Amino acid sequence: MRTRLPGRLLLRIYLVGLAQLLLIALAFNVARRYAMEGPRPRFFERNAAYFVSEWARFRDQPEVLQEVLDRAGQKLRVKVTMHAADGRLLASNVSPPGAPLSAEELRQLEQARVVDSSQSPHVMRVAIPETGPLEVYATLELPPHPGPPPDLWLMIAAVLGCTAITSIVFARSLAVPLQQLAATARAFGEGRLSARTGVRRRDELGQVAEAFDEMAERLTHLLRSQKELLANVSHELRTPLSRIRVALDLANEGDATLARESLADIAEDLNELERLVSDVLTAARLDFTTSQTPGGTPPLRREFVEAQFLVDKAAARFRSARQEHRLEVKVDGPLPMLEADPVLLRRAIDNLLDNAGKYSEPGSTVRLLSRSTADGLQVEVADEGMGIDANDMPHIFTPFFRGDRSRARKTGGVGLGLALARRIVVAHGGSLTLESQPGVGTTARISLPAAPEAGLDAPRHE
């Protein structure tokens, strides 16, 4: 798309550059005229009487006087003709010499002593001596003030043209990326989430464009995540609600036996709905935790808790819920104290254990290993299940993603378990990683920082 150069920006840049050039040219011209060429004739005008009086001392020596006037013509560029009061020519450095004054002009000169005419070229008449009867007078023709050089207007036109060209180039370098930014912002505001500036520069404008594109990318991801969240939650709600509706229809038809048989399924579906809502709310709460502003109150309910307590509770729950699996618990040495939200942190471990039970065969062994590290605590959950396909590994922590595409009721869940566990661990300043081989099993590893030393004497959750 061709961009139109804005006139205001071009005019502003052009006027600024033009004003600078004009000021420089004016200052240079004034300095040149008054510092180099101007002072000499103006100085002579102010001191003409003195020069003439000095020359008049040689009026009785014609050869010396002629030499003095010739030197004045060469050095000062002044044409001088000196006459005696009776009109006799004494000396002159101009040919032909100036004519003597008339009687009327002599009377005026004798009264004024210095007559300065405004004619061109500039002519002055000076009487000697300064007072008393006129004895000698000089007619001086001063050089004209230097005018502008003949190519001045050509130089000015060239300067103005160069200023216009550079201003256009400069304006385009600013205006084009700014217009692209404005057009992209409008397009993005209209809902075209793929709009990007495409500006690649190494200056400040390039930084602004890059920051805008990064912001647009984050907003696009956020908006798409919200849409996906709404679609996935709607999908996950539809299945249990449909089963509950079928069970209620059977009960409404009066089949008491089938209605009673459906109560267990309804209870299970309600539990599934409750867990889904709880997982979504917890995920949103943890999103707030990781993006809150400095100084905000975190939603985590932190307290000092024994890591051994969390491991024991998670193991007891798994044995109760997954009696068809063997749980092997191993603790290497004393476990550290943690500063954490015990409910959420236990939920993260429960989710990992639940996944291990869901995706491994009944009768297989699930291993829960806990150890103290230099930085804090490490918890591993390993199973002997189906494993995770390599193509699914990059998406395994994406909300509502499941390796089992059928979303069978046997495996349960809605694909929030791992995503929620990771957000809980990250909110506590730790990390969660997965290692898996299809057909061999999966190992989930949690690393958490220990509580600060100052908290070791605080009340413990046991």
Image (spheres, grey):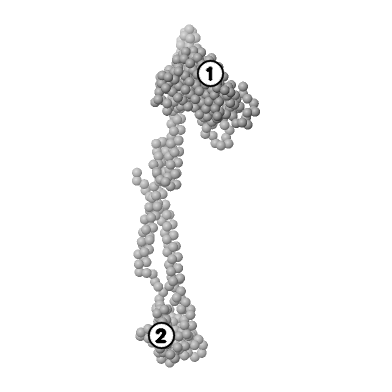
| Residue lying at 46% horizontally and 33% vertically, measured from the top left | 222
Q: What residue did someone put label 2 on?
A: 67
Look at the numbered disc 2 and give the secondary structure of its residue. Answer: helix
Mark 1 residue crowding within 10 angstroms, few (<14) / some (14–19) / many (20+): some
Q: Position of residue 404 (x, y in %)?
A: 41, 20
Asked whether residue 311 appears in the rendered view, the answer is yes
Q: What residue did someone put label 1 on?
A: 329
Q: Which of 372 and 349 is in front in this view?
A: 372
- Mark sitting on residue 461: none
Q: Is residue 311 above or below residue 224?
A: above
Q: Is residue 449 above or below residue 208?
A: above
Q: Where is residue 322 in the image (x, y as percent from the top left)?
A: 50, 15
| Residue lying at 44% horizontally and 73% vertically, measured from the top left | 38
From the image, which quarter does the N terminus lie in?
top left
Q: Is residue 320 above or below residue 208?
A: above
| Residue lying at 44% horizontally and 60% vertically, measured from the top left | 20
